[in-house]
Each structure stands twice: as structure tokens, then as C-alpha cells.
Image (cartoon, helix red, strand yellow):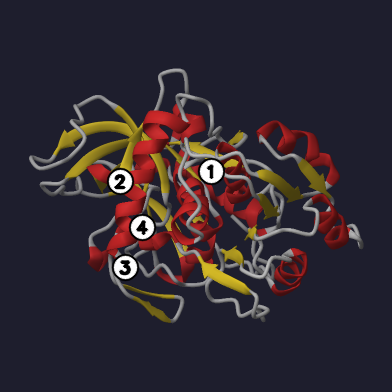
């Protein structure tokens, strides 16, 4: 039987065998080859958001095994695809997280990728790219490529995974992209399309951003979304009708009246009603429709034309048995400008598997 990394009591995770998941008429059954780690994965396990019996993990790349009769996209058995699922949900929802040998997803919410790209690389993109796209195109209303627009665009914390995607997507529509990161990351981010980079620790960073934007900055994506970062981003936004995207919906920040805030939660892309982080989220069919449209763009334009490049990959050996090490690195803020990726085939058999415990308290959360 296939394996998965399952949440148990006392925040323990264990690799165990589970029956093959069932797929619906509009869905694909996908054999997962690689998974990428996001902050939400360890947070769901560590903070008790993922209940016993659930499976964490969002990003996957894999191979189509079965195709539902009403599945869109003309997918065939054996095709390589990538996508993300809502990991960490209670098992009663019947949705497996990505840290599993098999996942099920609607055919409209996965994408093909070029043969020149490796599954290890492409698996870094599904969650962070849709997060950036929901903010830039769906919430702010900027045009999708190949359209062009003359605008200054700030990405605060450009070396985060979402930040790297936001830089590239803003540049794909010809924005003048300003970003912040540690100085060691500046050359790398300029290679992704950033026009100007500033060190976020610089006490004059806000004035430098405003100068670079010639005191006309109307769009910003805050990839940290904690009070001090958001305060500085707001100080840099000078246009009377400014727009700001943030990525931590449960963090309250004081936003000046000339700025419209958009709180992006990528889970809305699935079009389902959910209770998350102590709040009720209504189903957003428009978010799902946008995600379907964007993933087509990823498959047909952004990846083939090199407008969206994957994150740097750091492979953790041991497959799902390596998650203990990956979670520890992220909890200790030792992951920077990279994505941790696991190869499912490297996971030990059930008899050899290790228990993984996420009980160590971490006071600081990493950003996407």
C-alpha cells in the first residue's frame, strides 16, 4: 500500500501505509514524486492545527495515474504535473496533504511543465506562485501577461519564496520592481527581474524606496506582513490610491486610509468554505476560477517563456523521513532564498520508518 506522513497524538508524525485515495469524475489521481516544504507545513503540525489522522504538505509534483471521466485539460496517464493541495485538514474532509505517495486534485488546479524542467525544481512553484498571483492580478487588478503596465511595484522581502515569484510576475508585465532583502541576495534578485534592491535593515530604506519610485508608489506586496515590516511598507506607499497585499490574514496592522489592503490566503483557490485560524472563510468561486486561469498561464506561457523561474532547491535526503530535519531548519529560521524538497522514493519502508516529533517551541514564524 502507498505511504504518507500522518499526524498522530502529541504532534507526532509517522510514515505509515494507507489505502489508495479515491478520485472523483473531475479529478486526477497523481503519484507524487517530489514535495516541497512551506512554513504552513510545520506550523500546522507544531501548533496543533493539523489534527490526528490528517496529512500535512501542500506542494507536489508527480505523474498522472488515473483521470476522471469529466476531468478537463485532456490529461493522460503518465503525464508530469505539479500543483498544490490543502494540507493539514482534518481527515474527515478526505483531502490528503502532499506528504503522501498519492494525492487527488481537480484537473483544473494542476499544471503541466516543460520537459526541460526537473520535478525537483517545479515543485517549488505551485503554492507561492498562486499566492503572488492572487495578490498582484486578482486582488490588485493588475493585468495578466502578456499585457504591460507602467508602474512602480515594491516587493518587501524579495528573497522569500513568495517574494521571488512576486518579483517575476510584476516584471512580466513590465513594472519597475523595487525589492528589499539582505545585501547578499541582491544580485540573485536582480537576476529574477528586480530593478533596484535595498537592504531592509538600512535605517533609510523607506526614503530610498520613495526616491527610487520618484515619490509615486502605488503597489506593494508585503511578504512578511508583521507590524514593523508592514509599517515600513505603508510609509513607502505614496500614491493616494495605493494598494497593499499581505500574506498573514490573522495579523492585525494599522493601515493608513490612503492604502487599500488585500489579505491573501491561498487556500481560497480551492473554492471551498473553511474555518481557518479561528475565522470563517466563505467559498470564493471567483478565486478558484482565477487559479484555474493562472495555472493555464503558468503551463502555456510563464514557464515555457522563462517568465517564471523556480526557487533554489535544497534537497533533504531520506524522503518523508527527512521532514524532521527540514522542519527543524525552518523553525530555527535557517532556510533562506531556497526551498526544501523531498523525493518520495527515498522514504524508508514502513518497518524502517522513524517517528517525527514537532514539540519544540519556536517563538518566531518563518515567511513563505
Asked where in the image residue 234 lies, by quadrant, the reply is bottom right
Are there few (<14), some (14-19), or many (20+) residues within 10 Å of tag 3?
Answer: some
Question: Pointers 4 and 2 in contact (CB under 8 A)?
Answer: yes
Residue at image position (46%, 64%) is 265
How much space separates mark 1 and mark 4, taking CA atoms?
A: 29 Å
Left or right, 159 with respect to 322, comes to right
Mark 3 and mark 2 lie on one chain; the one further toward the N terminus is 3
**Across the whole image, how many numbered discs are drawn on residues?**
4
Q: Which of 123 and 189 is in front in this view?
A: 189
Tell me the element at label 2. Answer: helix
Residue 31 in picture, x, y percent from top left:
29, 35
Mark 1 and mark 3 lie on one chain; the one further toward the N terminus is 3
Give the residue number, with chain letter if any, for mark 1. Answer: 322
Of all residues, the one furthest to the right in this rendering is 203
Which quarter of the rendering shows the N terminus? Answer: top left
Residue 284 in picture, x, y percent from top left:
31, 66
Give the residue number, with chain letter if any, for mark 3. Answer: 90
Residue at image position (20%, 48%) is 21
How much space separates mark 3 and mark 4, taking CA atoms?
A: 18 Å
How much space separates mark 1 and mark 3, taking CA atoms?
A: 23 Å
How much space separates mark 3 and mark 2, taking CA atoms?
A: 21 Å
Query: What mark, if any, has residue 109 been given in the picture?
Result: 2
Give the residue number, with chain letter if any, for mark 4. Answer: 269
Q: Which of 74 and 327 is in front in this view?
A: 74
Left or right, 338 with respect to 86, comes to right
- Vertical comparison of 177 with 289: above or below: above
Of all residues, the one furthest to the top in this rendering is 116
Mark 1 and mark 2 lie on one chain; the one further toward the N terminus is 2
Amino acid at each position: 500500500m502507498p505511504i504518507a506522513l500522518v499526524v498522530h497524538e502529541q504532534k507526532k508524525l509517522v510514515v505509515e501505509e494507507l489505502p489508495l485515495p479515491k478520485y472523483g469524475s473531475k479529478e486526477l489521481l497523481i503519484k507524487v514524486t517530489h514535495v516541497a516544504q512551506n512554513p504552513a507545513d510545520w506550523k500546522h503540525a507544531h501548533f496543533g492545527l493539523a489534527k490526528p489522522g490528517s496529512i500535512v504538505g501542500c506542494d507536489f509534483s508527480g505523474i498522472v495515474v488515473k483521470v476522471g471521466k469529466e476531468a478537463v485539460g485532456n490529461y493522460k496517464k503518465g503525464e508530469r504535473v505539479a500543483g498544490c493541495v490543502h494540507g493539514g485538514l482534518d481527515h474527515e474532509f478526505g483531502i490528503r496533504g502532499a506528504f503522501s505517495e498519492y494525492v487527488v486534485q481537480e484537473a483544473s488546479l494542476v499544471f503541466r511543465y516543460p520537459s526541460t524542467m526537473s520535478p525537483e525544481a517545479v515543485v517549488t512553484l505551485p503554492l507561492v506562485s498562486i499566492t503572488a498571483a492572487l495578490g498582484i492580478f486578482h486582488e490588485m487588478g493588475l493585468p495578466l501577461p502578456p499585457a504591460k503596465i507602467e508602474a512602480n511595484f515594491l516587493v518587501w522581502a524579495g528573497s522569500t519564496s513568495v517574494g521571488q515569484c512576486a518579483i517575476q510576475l510584476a516584471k512580466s508585465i513590465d513594472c519597475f520592481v523595487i525589492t528589499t532583502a539582505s545585501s547578499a541576495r541582491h544580485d540573485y534578485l536582480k537576476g529574477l527581474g528586480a530593478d533596484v534592491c535595498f537592504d531592509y535593515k538600512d535605517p533609510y530604506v523607506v526614503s530610498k524606496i520613495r526616491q527610487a519610485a520618484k515619490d509615486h508608489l502605488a503597489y506593494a506586496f508585503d511578504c512578511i506582513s508583521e507590524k514593523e515590516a508592514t509599517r515600513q511598507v505603508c510609509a513607502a506607499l505614496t500614491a493616494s490610491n495605493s494598494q497593499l497585499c499581505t500574506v498573514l490574514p490573522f495579523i492585525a496592522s494599522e493601515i493608513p486610509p490612503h492604502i487599500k489592503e488585500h489579505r491573501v490566503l491561498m487556500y481560497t483557490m480551492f473554492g471551498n468554505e473553511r474555518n481557518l485560524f479561528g475565522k470563517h472563510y466563505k467559498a470564493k468561486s471567483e478565486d478558484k476560477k482565477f487559479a484555474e486561469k493562472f495555472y493555464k498561464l503558468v503551463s502555456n506561457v510563464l514557464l515555457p517563456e522563462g517568465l517564471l523561474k523556480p526557487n533554489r532547491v535544497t534537497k533533504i535526503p531520506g524522503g518523508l523521513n527527512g521532514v524532521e530535519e527540514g522542519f527543524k531548519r525552518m523553525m530555527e529560521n535557517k532556510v533562506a532564498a531556497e526551498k526544501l524538497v523531498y523525493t518520495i522514493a527515498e522514504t524508508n519502508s514502513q518497518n524502517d520508518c522513524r517517528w517525527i516529533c514537532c514539540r519544540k517551541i519556536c517563538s518566531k514564524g518563518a515567511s513563505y
